[in-house]
């Protein structure tokens, strides 16, 4: 494991800091997820931690909808597993252990949520890999903490995403955060254009 990366992620022992009543009041998952996480979609909760968003996403899904809870720490996935045991939405959650070099996901997603996690993943091919996971009309919902990420670093991240073929769809307002929803540009018209 890369020690520099390991020091950036929240350890399992501090999982309670990621899921508590204060955070639910400040960053209400129902409000944050309300407009894009519904129906028969495949969602990915990247860096799911103790399931703060995973469980709410699962509750919102219908029929064949699934949420893939992705984390590099087995301990976080174990916490989610214990929380969802025997719950009516348990079958809607797929637990997936990634590693620091690849997400190793082979499912296509309608939406990927990366809440307070992009700054923890220190690899240049992350956005390229996320592109391969998204369905052609899929969306990438990134939220980064203002107290860790400067406006300049955030804008540089957006610029990389634009260069990777994404376009900004929305900029949600989330307390203490910088947030953006992107989708892949539709280049089908451009490829048929005569120059």
Image (cartoon, helix red, strand yellow):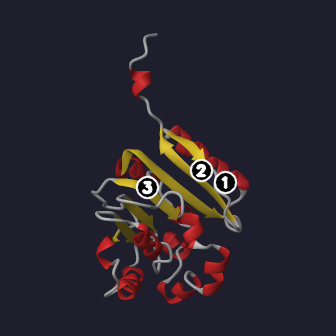
The 10 Å Cα crowd at callout 3, few under 14, some 14 to 19, many 20 or more, is many
| The one of 144 and 7 positioned closer to us in this rendering | 144
Q: Of helix, strand and loop, which one carries label 3?
A: strand
Give residue 163's position: percent from left, percent from top: 53, 38
Q: Of helix, strand and loop, which one carries label 1?
A: helix
Residue pointed to by mark 3: 111
Tally of numbered discs: 3
Residue 157: image tag: 2
Q: Which residue lies at the image location 38% right of the left edge and 70% below the top edge?
A: 69
Give residue 64's position: percent from left, percent from top: 28, 63
Give residue 29's position: percent from left, percent from top: 56, 72
Residue 153: image tag: 1
Q: Which residue lies at the image location 38% right of the left edge and 80% below the top edge?
A: 77
94 vs 147, left or right, is left
| The one of 125 and 86 positioned closer to us in this rendering | 86
The residue lying furthest to the top in this view is 195
**Mark 2–mark 1 contact, CB under 8 Å?**
yes
Query: To which quarter of the image does residue 16 belong?
Result: bottom right
**Picture quarter with the N terminus:** bottom left
Q: How far apart are labels 1 and 3 at the CA level?
A: 23 Å
Give residue 43's position: percent from left, percent from top: 39, 61
First in sequence: mark 1 vs mark 3: 3
- Residue 117, compared with residue 158, is above or below; it is below
Q: How far apart are labels 2 and 1 at the CA level?
A: 6 Å
Q: Of helix, strand and loop, which one carries label 2?
A: helix
The 10 Å Cα crowd at callout 2, few under 14, some 14 to 19, many 20 or more, is some
118 vs 26, left or right, is left
Query: To which quarter of the image does residue 70 belong?
Result: bottom left
**Mark 3–mark 2 contact, CB under 8 Å?**
no
First in sequence: mark 3 vs mark 2: 3
């Amino acid at each position: 494991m890369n020690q520099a990366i390991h020091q950036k992620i929240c350890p399992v022992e501090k999982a309670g800091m990621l899921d508590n009543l204060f955070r639910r009041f400040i960053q209400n998952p129902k409000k944050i997820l309300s407009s894009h996480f519904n129906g028969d979609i495949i969602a990915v909760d990247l860096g799911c931690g103790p399931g703060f968003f995973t469980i709410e996403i699962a509750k919102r899904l219908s029929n064949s909808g699934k949420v893939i809870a992705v984390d590099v720490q087995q301990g976080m996935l174990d916490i989610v597993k214990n929380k969802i045991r025997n719950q009516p939405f348990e079958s809607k959650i797929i637990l997936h252990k990634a590693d620091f070099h690849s997400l190793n996901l082979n499912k296509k997603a309608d939406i990927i949520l990366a809440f307070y996690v992009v700054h923890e993943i220190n690899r240049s091919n992350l956005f390229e890999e996320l592109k391969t996971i998204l369905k052609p009309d899929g969306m990438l919902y990134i939220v980064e903490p203002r107290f860790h990420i400067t406006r300049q670093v955030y804008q540089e991240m957006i610029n990389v995403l634009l260069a990777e073929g994404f376009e900004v769809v929305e900029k949600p307002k989330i307390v203490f955060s910088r947030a953006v929803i992107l989708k892949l540009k539709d280049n089908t018209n451009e490829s048929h254009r005569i120059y």
